[in-house]
Structure formats: structure tokens, C-alpha cells
Image (cartoon, rainbow, N blue to C red):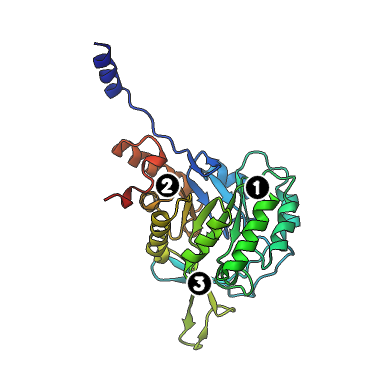
């Protein structure tokens, strides 16, 4: 009798789905994050993004010393809601940025770091010891700056040394952001995992270029840049699926995500959270709340109570 009663009550009481998610040790109230490279510039902006529905914000990639980046033009729009950018990782440097975010108490901030040797990463992390940092993301995949990014990610031995050094320097979770370079990206993933990485972000922008047919010259001052936006979404989705099929590691999906449907695709492929960048440029900060609401409605319709109910379902036969 009691069992029948509980069964009827269960069918009448619908549990509200939760957007909370975990990426290993990282706990977030919402699964949609700001990707590195756009708007990751000031604490005021971070607070606004967080209030607008971002589960976390990833800073611009920071170097040991300030970098000016490349001269204009540094960004160009391409057909199909895509962008090619070669900003050159311009940033104020780790020390200056750490001072800027030191007052932070509320926003989950993931600090993106870029460098060419392990000692640089170690020094930068020490600059953030007095800051509230949720995680560090190692940029092993920027496609348009020499001696850092992809050139580091393509060197398994260097990846091993950097990840090992960083893990020995901090107890805060460390994420490796991988991309498509000259070596197979799964080699970078495997090396990072073997070296103790806590999670993987896949993927970065894809090396690309554009040429002006009138001047007959490359449009970007650096000639080559990184392609982002909708054109790379199927590639990023494939990479997340491949990583989650081969390795037991938390994954953050990144690349061409602009709608709740895109986000759900990445969950089904195996990611526990997602990052977006170009979509913020197209739809401003409202995009976080729009995607969160869409995910919730989908979860209600499908009867899911939490994000993990969806993660990796596309891999099941």
C-alpha cells in the first residue's frame, strides 16, 4: 500500500532539473562558461558575465610579461558566422592581472596561462596565490603565436614538463586546452593525462587565413589566425567525442557553440561543461541565460534531473 502511494506521489511530484555540474574537482552552478580570448579583461566585466548566467569565466591567456600583440587588422569575419583572429595574445601580464582580480570573492575565475617553458608557468601561478582562482587553464593550442600555444602542445616532452611543474606548484585544479596542430591532438591529451592534468578543454581555434582579392594580400597583419565560431563546431564536437571515447577524463567542450542545442550536443558527446566566445560577440551577454534556459527546458522534456544524466549518451550503442 505504502509502495503504491509513494509511486503515485513520485509521478505527481516533478523534480526541477539542476544546471549544476562538476568537471573533476571543479564545481559550477551552471555549465556555460566564457571561453578565453573574449571579454576576459576586467573584474567588472567578469561580475557582469557571472550575473548574466555564466557558470565561470576564463581570462585572456596571460603571459609572464605584458604582450602587445599584433598590429591591426587582427580579426576578420567569414561566411557562416565565423571569425578569423590573430590578436597575438595581447595581455597585461600575469602580475598586473593578478592585482586586478585580487578583490574577487564571488566569480568563479579560471586563469588561462601561456608560456614556452615550465618555469614561466610556475612563476605565473605564484602571482595568483592571494587570488580566488577556481582553476588554471594551460593554453597549449593557440595557433598563431610562435614558441607558445600549438608549438608547445605539439611537443609531448614539453607538455609533460609543463603539466608536471604546474601540478607540483598548486593544489588548484589544472585544465589543458588542446587544439589541432602538426601532431595528433590525442597525443597531447594522452601526455597531459599521464602527467596528472585534471581536465581537458577541446578545442582552441583552428589555424586559418583569408586573402583580399583586390590587394591580393593576406587580410590579417599576421597572415595566419585562428578560425572560431560555427564553422568549427562539427570539428570540436568530433574531438570531444573522440577524447571521451578513449580517455576517462572530464572534458569542457569549446568551439562554435552558440545555442542550447549546440551545448546539448557537446554534453551528449561527452563534455560536462561548455565554453563559448564568438557567440558573445554576436549576441552579447544575454547568450548565457538563453542557453541555460534552453538546456533546462530540454532536460524537463527528456526527464533529466542533472547534467551528468546526458553526458556521453551519444556513445551508447
Cα–Cα span, label 2 and label 1: 22 Å
Q: Which mark is residue 181?
A: 3
Mark with earlier residue (3, 1): 1
- Image height check: is 144 above or below 199? below
Element at badge 3? Answer: loop
Distance between mark 2 and mark 3 Cα atoms: 30 Å
Q: Secondary structure at mark 1?
A: helix
Residue 240 location in percent, x, y? Answer: 42, 57
Q: Which residue is mark 2?
A: 291
Q: Could you say where residue 12 lies in the image, as x and y percent from the top left?
A: 28, 22
- Decide: is 245 above or below 4: below
Among numbered discs 2 and 3, the one appearing first in the sequence = 3
- Please indicate whether residue 215 sits to the left or right of residue 164 in the image: left
Q: Nearer the viewer, mark 3 or mark 1?
A: 3
Q: Nearer the viewer, mark 2 or mark 1?
A: 2
Q: Which residue is mark 1?
A: 44
Is 247 displayed left or right of 49 in the figure? left
Quadrant of the frame with the N terminus:
top left
Residue 258 seen in this snapshot: no
Residue 65 at x, y = what percent? Answer: 74, 64
Residue 176 seen in render: yes
> Which is nearer the N-term, disc 2 or disc 1?
1
Q: Residues within 10 Å of mark 3 (few under 14, many from 20)?
A: many
Amino acid at each position: 500500500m505504502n509502495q503504491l502511494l509513494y509511486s503515485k506521489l513520485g509521478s505527481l511530484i516533478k523534480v526541477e532539473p539542476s544546471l549544476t555540474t562538476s568537471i573533476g574537482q571543479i564545481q559550477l552552478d551552471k555549465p556555460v562558461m566564457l571561453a578565453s580570448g573574449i571579454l576576459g579583461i576586467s573584474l567588472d566585466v567578469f561580475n557582469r558575465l557571472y550575473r548574466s548566467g555564466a557558470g565561470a569565466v576564463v581570462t585572456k591567456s596571460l603571459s609572464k610579461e605584458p604582450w602587445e600583440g599584433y598590429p591591426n587588422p587582427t580579426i576578420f569575419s567569414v561566411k557562416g558566422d565565423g571569425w578569423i583572429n590573430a590578436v597575438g595574445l595581447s595581455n597585461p601580464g600575469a602580475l598586473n592581472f593578478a592585482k586586478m582580480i585580487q578583490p574577487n570573492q564571488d566569480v568563479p575565475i579560471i586563469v588561462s596561462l601561456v608560456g614556452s617553458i615550465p618555469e614561466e608557468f610556475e612563476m605565473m601561478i605564484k602571482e595568483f596565490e592571494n587570488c580566488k582562482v577556481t582553476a588554471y587553464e594551460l593554453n597549449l593550442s593557440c595557433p598563431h603565436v610562435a614558441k607558445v600555444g600549438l608549438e608547445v602542445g605539439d611537443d609531448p616532452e614539453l607538455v609533460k614538463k609543463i603539466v608536471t611543474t604546474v601540478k607540483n606548484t598548486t593544489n588548484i585544479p589544472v585544465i589543458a586546452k588542446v587544439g589541432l596542430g602538426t601532431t595528433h591532438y590525442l597525443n597531447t591529451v594522452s601526455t597531459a593525462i599521464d602527467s596528472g592534468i585534471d581536465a581537458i578543454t577541446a578545442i582552441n581555434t583552428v589555424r586559418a587565413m583569408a586573402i583580399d582579392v583586390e590587394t591580393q594580400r593576406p587580410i590579417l597583419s599576421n597572415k595566419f589566425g585562428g578560425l572560431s565560431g560555427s564553422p568549427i563546431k562539427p570539428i570540436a564536437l568530433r574531438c570531444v567525442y573522440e577524447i571521451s571515447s578513449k580517455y576517462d577524463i572530464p572534458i569542457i567542450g569549446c568551439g562554435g557553440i552558440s545555442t542550447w542545442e549546440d551545448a546539448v550536443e557537446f554534453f551528449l558527446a561527452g563534455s560536462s561543461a561548455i565554453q563559448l566566445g564568438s557567440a558573445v560577440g554576436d549576441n552579447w551577454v544575454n547568450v548565457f541565460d538563453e542557453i541555460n534556459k534552453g538546456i533546462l527546458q530540454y532536460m524537463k522534456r527528456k526527464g533529466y534531473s542533472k547534467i551528468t544524466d546526458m553526458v556521453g549518451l551519444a556513445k551508447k550503442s
